Amino acid sequence: MHAILAGVSKLSLSRTHQPHRYNRHMPGSTLVEWREWSEATFAEAKAKNKPVLLGISAVWCHWCHVMDHGIPGDPIHTGVYSDPQIANYINEHFIPIRVDNDQRPDINARYNMGGWPTTCFLTPDGDVLYGATYLAPSHMRAILPRIVSAWHTEREEILRQIAEAAGQAEARKRTPAPADAPLQQLANVAEDVWRAVITRIVRNYDRRHGGLGEGQKFPMSDVWALLIAEHLRSREPLMLDLAVRTLVAMGTGGMYDRVAGGWFRYSTTPDWSVPHFEKMLEDHARLLPVYAQAIACCRKLGRQEEVRTLSSVVESALDYLLATLLRDTPSLVYFAGSQDADEHYYMLSRLERAKLTPPFIDWRLYADWNALMVSALLHVAAVLERPALAALAERIWDTLVRHTLQSDGSVIHSLIPDGDYMRPSSLVGVLADQAALLQACLDVAQCRPSRAAQAMRVASQVWGYVCSALQAEDGGFYDVPPRQDALGMLRVRIKPLADNAALAAALAQWSSLTDDVSLREAAAAALCAFLNEYPRYGEHAAPFALAVWRAVTPPDEVVIIASAEQAAQWVQAAMARPSSWQVVRLLDPIGDAPHIAARGYPADRTPVAFVCQGQTCSAPLVTPQALQAA
């Protein structure tokens, strides 16, 4: 927000998270004449010399629905965009644009003001004048004329400040050239990165309720994955205890739907008792593999009560996903993106719910979230010994490859249902989508041997696009490819830490699978670009710490020498063993005989497996059970 509008900030209202009796999805238009984010819309704003009102919402977002339509009977939250007086003022004095967060994460990444809805006022060129999240009608009525007055009477000063701020941002953005020998540079600091992030997590841990902090609690899957990895690396029991306690709390408290299964988006209270009632596919895709790893660790240690509790949570979450969010047709198999919040519905029993219309489901296919689900299902299938889940993961992967992967290796961000047809979105080549599909390819290659060759070809295709369209000259990768017609802040390219970490982790695994050192060097180069930046992320740097460690540390290498017909049970055993960092290499006794001989594996008896670290391997493991216990 620029100084000329500083007085407006006193009128902003952060989203309250108190529960409401009304929380129903209300589809339909408002009285505001919303436009799409487009060149024509910004041209209209320039021609009419009007500021832009950008509303960023999501179909699952309760407070977005409240801002659209209000809460019946509530004297304060009566609805902003359905208020005739407010809507008429907006239509007359602003060019209003509505953007869906899930459909346009690139716009959200540049304009989000700290939550949803985001209410952002822009110049006709797309620069930010002022931004907030939820605004009640009284606050919106006060802000709108101030924005209009400032734009028309103090425009020159506003534009001067915007230009000055842009110059300062450009100066801050300049980073040193990529370091020589990035892998060595990363190795020199990897332990410091690891310790710094873990120390931050432990310091902020809520010893009373689990989770981090003393306010609202989010799942933060990468945090618990990092602690479990540290437990497996150091054998420190406390790390596993902190993670498991939180996972149990998230799966048995109010943040979990104990009627139909599945996690709500977050808890509004520190004790996990009062949820925000959206259910997000992304959260499930990220939580499931962490729960699976915790189950494997507890099983190994004989902590059977925790195994039963965590397994029950995962099983019921799978029941919810398969019954409610899965679309399974001969041509398309995928999970919907989300289910809307509805406090009244979710507080009812199963029989009472059956009498009502379930909350709205967003049936769009999101490439990154479904790719994450492919990886999640493959891991959970092994730990819970449910091979049908692995078969489902393969079919979802097929859908992604057939319908979202383009010939140049770019991934279409989402497919939108349009009758029996799935219409592709215009957003392609997003780093999060590319990284998630690349990781899914690697997991399919390891867990579904018959698809390994195809999966690795697709991985090469996806990586080729990333190198050509997303790589930054000063290190790391941009979130979206360049566009000559980029509007507003989309002309500023950004490098998201979490998505770069996801890509680097996948590259490190790929390097270990193929012995291609250049892939590990590429991972290290991407991560080195964030070495000065990651500390400000605090515990949110957990995925970065995991990626750094994987880039510089050889994994457990599980080598299985077996025919394709014999492989399934062995692969499942390998994936079910608790390991903080491993790859599974399947070798055919006949087709890979030269490689087996060159590596010196004693393969006089097959099937057989070995667990190796570097040049050191275990004794031959002649049963899947021995492999899982190794």
Image (cartoon, rainbow, N blue to C red):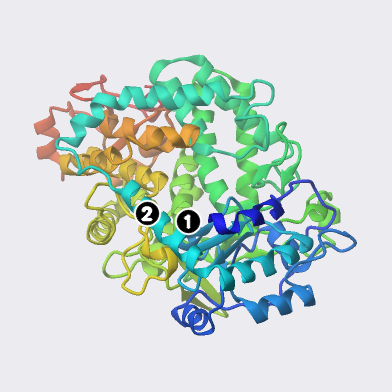
Q: Residue at x 64, y 64 (%)?
A: 59
Q: Which mark is residue 344?
A: none
**Observer able to see residue 84:** yes
Image spot of residue 217 (x, y percent): 64, 37
Q: Residue at x 33, y 53 (%)?
A: 170
Which amino acid, mark 2?
Ile
Crowding near the residue tagged with mark 2, few <14, some 14–19, many ≥20 C-alpha atoms within 10 Å: some
Q: Residue at x 47, y 21 (%)?
A: 199
Q: Secondary structure at mark 1?
A: helix
Which amino acid, mark 1?
Ala
Question: In the shown orientation, is residue 287 left or right of residue 76?
Answer: left
Q: Quadrant of residue 204?
A: top right
Q: Give the answer, above or below, for where 420 lies relative to 528.
A: below
Image spot of residue 574 (x, y percent): 37, 33
Nearest the camera: 583 or 411? Answer: 411
**Observer able to see residue 52:** no
Nearest the camera: 400 or 192? Answer: 192
Crowding near the residue tagged with mark 1, few <14, some 14–19, many ≥20 C-alpha atoms within 10 Å: some
Q: Residue at x 69, y 57 (%)?
A: 134
Q: Secondary structure at mark 2?
A: loop
Q: Are marks 2 and 1 in contact (CB under 8 Å)?
A: yes
Q: Give the answer, above or below, for where 478 lies relative to 203.
A: below
Question: In the shown orientation, is residue 309 left or right of residue 224?
Answer: right
Q: Quadrant of residue 231?
A: top left
Q: Dot 2 corresponds to which residue?
A: 494
Give the CA separation, mark 2 to mark 1.
9 Å
Nearest the camera: 487 or 514? Answer: 487
Q: Which mark is residue 109?
A: 1
